[in-house]
Amino acid sequence: MNIGRLNWLGLALLLGTFLFAALRVISYSRQSNDPDRPVLRFAHWQLEGGVRDAFDEVAREYMRLHPHVRVEQLAIPDRAYPSWLRTQLVGGTAPDLIAVGMGVTDELLARFFTPLTEHVEQPNPYNQGTPLEGLPWRSTFVDELTGSAFNVNLLEYYSIPSTLFTVRVFYNRDLWRSALGDTPHPADYRAFLAICARVEEWARERNRPISAISGSRYNAPFLMAQLFRGQTQRLALDVDMLRTMNASPSELGVAFLRGEFDLEDDAIRSGLTLMREVGHHMQPGFLQLGRDDAMFRFAQGTTLMMATGSWDATSLRQQVPFELGVFSLPSPAADDAEFGRFVLGPASEGNIRTASGFGLTRQSQNPELALDFLHFLASRPGNRLFTGRSGWLPAIVGVEPDAFMAPFVPRIEGVPDGFDLTLRSLGPDLERARDNHLHHLFSPSGGVDEFLRRFAPAARSAIRDGLRMRSRNAGRNVMRQDVQLAAFHRLGALRPDEQAQHASRFAALLEGQNSQEADLIWIEQELGRLASPP
Amino acid sequence: MHTYVSSPSRALPRLALALAVLGLAACSPRDHAARSGPLTAEQAWELAGLSLLDDAGRAFRTLSSESAKEEALFGRALTLLVAQPKTETNIHQAARLLTALADEASDPGLRVAARYYLGRVEQVHRLAPDRAAAARIYAALFEEHPDTLFGQLAFIKWSLLELHRGAAEDFEARASAVEDAGRLLTIPTLRKEHHLHLAFARLRNGRRDQTTLAHLRSAVELGVVRVNSRTNATIALVNLAHELGDHETALRFGRDFLAEFPRDIRASRVREILATLPSENPAEAASS
């Protein structure tokens, strides 16, 4: 075939594709622009089992209540979501409602999303006839929307959540019964270790390749970080210079550099010992495995347990060929002879906030309708439908989770947790330093001493870098806030009837700015002091 | 050897491709300003309030109304400070505009605001910040305009610099100076900021004493706005009051905390503290 023919074939293919796409667009536009049946589209990245069905069910019920409306769901894979989202927003083709979180920056929020602040202070009409009738919408959420729904930099509510997430240990009930009989769930760390040892012994006797825990670089940290944090509960209070019982990453970093604690501290060594012990009950090489590998081994029945979040509950229930059980992550009890002296008690999960929220785009052709659908989705009846089908935890007060999810309900009673090796996510350098050396903790020839010998020098410099990064980030925020503060002040002066509103935004933003500014000046002062010789 | 020659069979696909590119370019979204023409000063400030600072900068540049001239200059100066990429030229030009406004603006409030932002230029916006210069501008502004919002705000910024400089041994003297000067503040929001940051600076310097407690209490009573800041300030107050034996304060603010934040991870700790206080424990109260 000569080049000329190939060119014509290519052109024909191009034209054919163009025509097909054009016809699709025209047909879609006609549907979308049908004034008698507006189309409402919402997009998200939650492809876990049951979630799309749950959204479909909510949409069907909404369409039953409003037969003139058509609701469409767009489920986008999480890997493509950030770029898809940006393309849609910038291209002016965004759907009415978009799941906010992955890839949505403050700038995108401000530019492309409608603030929902005035709406969250009004009652949700779909709560009529329920005990939530007449309450401000905000007060009908289990956390009163104190989580990511409110953007602390823009001082507005931008999304409406539908769930919250917790982490638990899933186990294979069939395997549990075979290996452990009617042994109850472990009440603490010792009982958990005993169960790990028993199931492995049972497997060895039968020559079956079974590990107690399905680990991976995704799953293992859920369990290990919690054990480590339990050991630093007292230490976190000792270095809590502001007496808030919630030392920030910067405070922990400065306390470390000041020498108020170090990696040789008994509590830190004890936390690492726990991590090593638990790591030995995961399959060999678990640090090299990903989320899907751990899930696959668990589903195959070659591990008894796996720690993961409530977001995976429905997928697991659909995929595994055995009965699933769930229990809370175990921690050493306060009376544990070896580890108890560092523990204050079970950690509270009261700081877990609602998540997975939808924002209303400014490009929405039917913003009132989109808001109405959001009202329905986050009403007591709507959230009950969503929760019942998705198996996720409810975000609305008074909606009961399904029986399987009961163990996932956040535990409010408890004490503030300690910190992990990343000092509550001080910065990426510290996480990288930890990850680079973590295999020394688990290797047969390694251990706590070997890990610390490798990690300690890297940690000190990574903590300094983390503090510098935080200071730089705070500086950038402070600069932008300078302009916003002037804006609120001038708007108050130019529009006397809105003065109170702008004064209140000025006060809130100034509080945030001063707090960040004090932190950054203090960090720089401490870094300067600690760098100079005494 | 193959020679490439332009031929009709190749030109047509190229033409199609060129047309497609032109078509795409024609369909690309245009910016807000281009669609809707020049904005008013209020609209430009609205964009700035939403943190859409590039758009706000463009809007201020296109403001033509004579009545909004000073507003436009002020807006232009501030948006130049955050324009990307950050350049010495932009910062220098912003400082020049602010200086002109500080000297000549017809609105006295704008003159004070411009001087305040000259302090901000020195402290945070310059590529090589000069905190000492900023502190001098803030101190002078507060001295000359102690009754204005930006005069008092300048004091708060000066105090943050003052509390976090120098040797640890000098802290008490600097904190006392800040404390004394802060008595002139009259705006409740700024008084609260003063007490809050003085208390936290004292705590960072190891001062767990009655003075710190008094500042924390004043801040919480004046009203901390943000939820996270309010929980932290109230918990710090309850803890410190408990440590110092001020049962009345621990009890009052502990109860307030539990009423407002029953789900907070520190609620159980507050309940523990309250349970140890005499008025929550009738037997102990009777014996004491």
Image: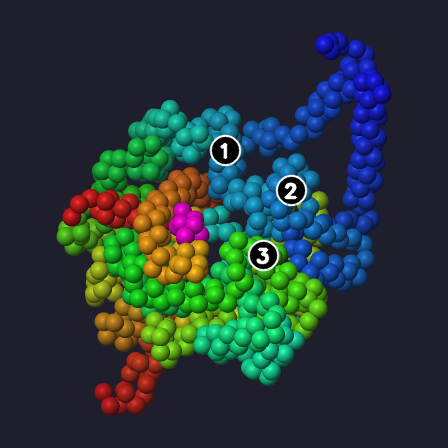
Left or right: A407 with respect to A265?
A: right
Residue A174 position, x and y percent, is 65, 76
Residue B102 position, x and y percent, is 32, 31
Residue contact between numbered discs 1 and 3, judged by CB atoms under 8 Å: no
Which is nearer the N-term, disc 3 or disc 2? 2
Query: Is residue B173 located in the magenta-colored stretch of the structure?
Result: no
Front of the two marks 3 and 2: 3
Q: In this rendering, do the residues under marks 1 and 2 share a single chain?
A: no
Judged by its main secondary structure, the magenta piece is helix
Q: Classify the position of the N terminus of chain A by image quarter.
A: top right
Q: Secondary structure at mark 3?
A: helix
| Residue under numbered circle 3 | A291
Callout 1: residue from which chain?
A: B
| Amino acid type assigned to the residue bearing label 1 in the image | Asp
Q: Secondary structure at mark 1?
A: helix
Q: In this rendering, do the residues under marks 1 and 3 share a single chain?
A: no
Residue A515 position, x and y percent, is 35, 51
Categorize mark 1 by other alpha carbons within 10 Å: few (<14), some (14-19), many (20+). Answer: some
Front of the two marks 1 and 3: 3
Region rendered in magenta: A429-437
How far apart marks 1 and 2 lie (CA) works out to 24 Å
Residue A514 seen anywhere in this rendered image of the structure: no
How far apart marks 1 and 3 lie (CA) works out to 41 Å
Q: Quadrant of residue B215?
A: bottom left
| Residue under numbered circle 2 | A84
Q: Secondary structure at mark 2?
A: helix
Above or below, B94 relative to A353: above
| Residue under numbered circle 1 | B54
| Amino acid type assigned to the residue bearing label 3 in the image | Arg
| Amino acid type assigned to the residue bearing label 2 in the image | Trp
Callout 3: residue from which chain?
A: A
